[in-house]
Image: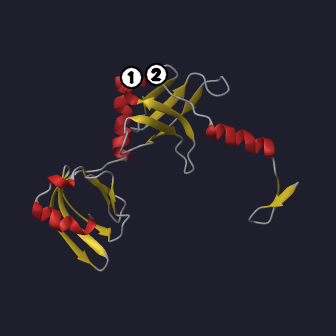
Amino acid sequence: MGFKNFEGADEEFNLEQMEAETEAMLRLRYLTGDNATFTRTAGGFVSLDIAKGENGEPEHYDRVRVVRSFPFTAPGTYISIRTTEEKSKEIGIIKDLAKDVSKETRKMLEEQMNLRYFTPVITKINDIKEEYGHAYFDVETTEGPCKFVIYMNSSSVVSLSDVRLMITDLDGNRFEIPDYTTLSAGELKKLDLFL
């Protein structure tokens, strides 16, 4: 039985292969200090060695991506370790960084995630100007003064809780306001368009 793919070429449909690939995608492998060793590479990345892989043989990954499954609500749990190619595949999950790996490994993985999830906290709003469908922010952050621009739409400012806001600028940079109720009355008035 064959079918035509988008280019029009015939391909053999292999149900067994598709079922095996689906099963592999759905299977969770938990990584701990007992079965996985993370090492810092010369270039500042992280490599991974698994003592006993899926087929019973050791596995080595020269470089891995460290991704939070719940970056805002549970940043230290269910950490996904992935391959680095564009369509990355999950190698395994660390359930809890504080319990499942050594302090040194936790520090190394947190450094990688802090680079990936760099999110300065806005400590003061100096000014917000609206013009032609954009908002121009002039703020103070935990990383120093900053000016950035966002689209005036609902996806640029997202409520993470009753008081916590995440702001994403035109370049995809993220900024956080942990509790907007702590801002001054003047700052709240400037931010009022987004609340």
Q: Which quadrant holds the N terminus?
A: bottom right
Task: Report whether residue 161 is seen.
Answer: yes
Do the residues bearing badges 2 and 1 touch, measured as CB atoms within 8 Å? Answer: yes
Tell me where residue 88 appears, x and y as whole percent. 55, 46
Mark 2 and mark 1: span between their CA atoms? 7 Å
The residue positioned 26% from the left and 63% from the top of the image is 195
Q: What residue type is labelled 1?
A: Ser
Q: Mark 2 points at which residue?
A: 33
Q: Name the residue under label 1.
A: 102
Residue 121 as seen in the image, left or right of residue 184:
right
The residue positioned 45% from the left and 42% from the top of the image is 69
The correct choice, above or below, for 61 with respect to 100 in the image is below
Label 1: element kind: loop
Give the colour scheme of this rendering: secondary structure
- Residue 160 circle label: none
Residue 136 as seen in the image, left or right of residue 28:
left
